[in-house]
Amino acid sequence: MDLSIVIVNFNVKEFLTQCLESIYRSQTNYQYEVVVVDNASVDSGQALIMKAFPAVRWIQNTENVGFGRANNQGFEAAKGEYTLILNPDTVVQEDTLEVCISYLKSHPEVGGLGVKGIDGAGQFLPESKRGLPTPLTALWKITGLSRMFPKSAFFARYHMGHLDPDANHKVDILVGCFMMVPTALLRKVGGFDPRYFMYGEDIDLSYELLKSGHENHYISDSQIIHYKGESTKRGSLNYVRMFYQAMVIFAKKQFSGSSALAYTLLIYLGIYLRAGLALLARLAKSAATPVIDAFLLALTLDQLKTYWEHNHRFINGGSYPDTYTYYIQGSYILFWLLALGLSGVYTKNARPAVIARTMAVATLVIGFCYGLLPEALRFSRALLILGGLSGITVLISWRSVIGFLTGKHLFTRPIQRPRMLYLGSDSGKQKLQKLLAENGIVPAFFLQDQVATNATVDLEEVAAKIRLYSINECIIESTAWPTSTLMKIMAELGTKTNIKSLITQGPYIVGSNSSLNQGEAYGLGRFNVANANYRRQKRLLDLVLTFLLFATLPITGALAVLFGRTKGVALWIAKSGKLLTGQATLIGYSTDAAERNQLPKLASPIFDIANGIPKVLNVSQSESALVTNYAKEAELKSDLHQLWQLSKF
């Protein structure tokens, strides 16, 4: 046996399937085996994977023993002259195994071998070649100087930015997603140090190989795809803690004296800096967000008031009374926050345009109500307008700054229906369309490229179609073309659209930032009415509208008489107790309708949407279509429309 490929799997059966598919399509005369060690996955996919790839040797752990220990289990079982440490979220090119084994056979001085890695968008992964993380190298990385001077041999030593990624080089550290090592040498240095649970093992092993008198080489003669982060699902605070703890273990083990002390201090500095930024990012996307908004809006309004007092309103002395400072400005902030909450800014709709539009509309509504107040409470329209405009700037700015510092996306990207270009066979197309249909996904546009499978792909033609039809997802059948073709498409077009693979064995859709299977495609559920964000918004709408109803009862009573909604408002008031306690909701469908049509249950509605069915229609048939459609496409805008329609008896 020439090669043993060891893969540790943890809850990434979709990526593992594609990884194995790419391995068994390798064009090599060398003999190899594949050993999969599953670290107690919730759903390992073992049955389907073993059916598709019966030659795989499967080792099942009853607990998650960590990346290093699990790999060591595979090393012990390895029969090959060489061992390849491979992540499950990788794809190897057809020639990768042949190129790497041949290279090691002709370079006996090499202890560890790595190859060029690209991500799911076809971009080079700089961690494919790294320098030894000495205290000075760590300092440049922690302070950000390595990013400021990415090609510097001095500052960018961590990723060896001065070395051409398209050439072969002698390096210090290889990345653990792909590392080929002579098996005897791997066992001699003890494999992975079990003290590392996750992260840092590859750095430690690379250094141990150097200490054994061997060299580590990076080659660009072949390449792999690494869907970076998919096998570990890096979480902000947890990732920071685990990664830097691994670095502390490395420092204590490999350095001594002042070097170890300096390195440890730098690592802890990095921990606190990264943890602080990660905490900021988490706060910015948590329940604390409206509190931060309220604080900044209060501060902004207070500064505007001070400026206006000194430069316009009370030039010769004086100030606004406490009534304005605490009650009027407080009312502005409360109303703005309620409007932002109803528009979904604190759940799923935090986009700059939504923030700006919501603040603008809320300010106009406040301005209208302002004109109805007694003259003694009308202090300054100018401060209201300035407050609204400044509030928009502040709310968008602080999110932008935190996002820039932490690298997190704090603004929600608008949900787009996929516009798909499919490259593959007709049988693959049928599986793809079935997969989409089972998940309730209807592409806004679907086009199958007519290029014959296994033929050369005309990238210029594909790029032209992507531009012409505004394609945002290019789906490639994984077995229709060589893996090298997939990589070429990613490298050329990955920055223009999302490149994903259809794994027909699943079937699964695997992409650069997602793995989509039959139960979780695009992260969307079948019914929007079951979405936690929508339910929170719906509950908030019920409370706010009921509060406004009672707060403006004389006015709403008169409007109810004027617009013929007296009975509707009376019913609303009569059931307001149940509504406030969550036993009822303003708009929805009955529990009986939910059971008949197998829909998510809602609180009992005050205004049942089934009551809006015209009598000339078959009520039972119409109810089924009506409530099912409501469950799928529920949103606050349609709830408000339904409320207006159904409140008239």
Image (cartoon, rainbow, N blue to C red):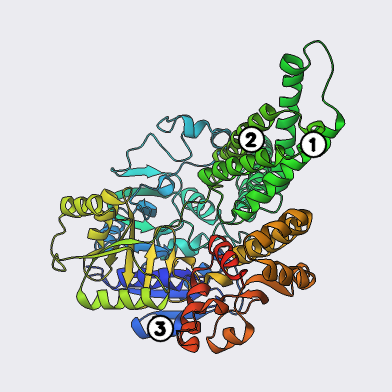
Give the residue displayed 44% in from the left and 51% down from the top: 174
Spot occupied by residue 416 in the image (x, y as percentages of width and height): 41, 57
Look at label 1 and name its amino acid. Answer: Pro
Residue topped by disc 2 = 388
According to the picture, the residue beneath numbered tag 3 turns out to be 48
Cβ–Cβ under 8 Å for marks 2 and 1: no
Q: Amino acid at mark 2?
A: Gly
Q: Which residue is mark 1?
A: 374
**Among the 4 quarters of the image, the one containing residue 333:** top right
Q: Measuring 76% from the left and 22% from the top, which residue is drawn there?
A: 306
Query: Of marks 3 and 2, which one's residue comes earlier in the chain?
Result: 3
| Front one among 600 and 124 | 600
Q: Quadrant of residue 17?
A: bottom left
Q: Residues within 10 Å of mark 3 (few under 14, many from 20)?
A: some
Q: Can residue 54 be seen?
A: no
391 vs 17, nearest the viewer: 391
Question: Is residue 326 shown above or below 223?
Answer: above
Amino acid type for the residue under numbered disc 3: Leu
Q: Above or below — where is 88 with respect to 336? A: below
Q: Quadrant of the C terminus?
A: bottom right
User: Marks 3/1: CA distance?
Assistant: 73 Å
As measured in the structure, the alpha-carbon distance from the residue carrying label 2 to the one carrying label 1 is 22 Å
The disc, 2 or 1, on the residue closer to the chain's N-terminal end is: 1
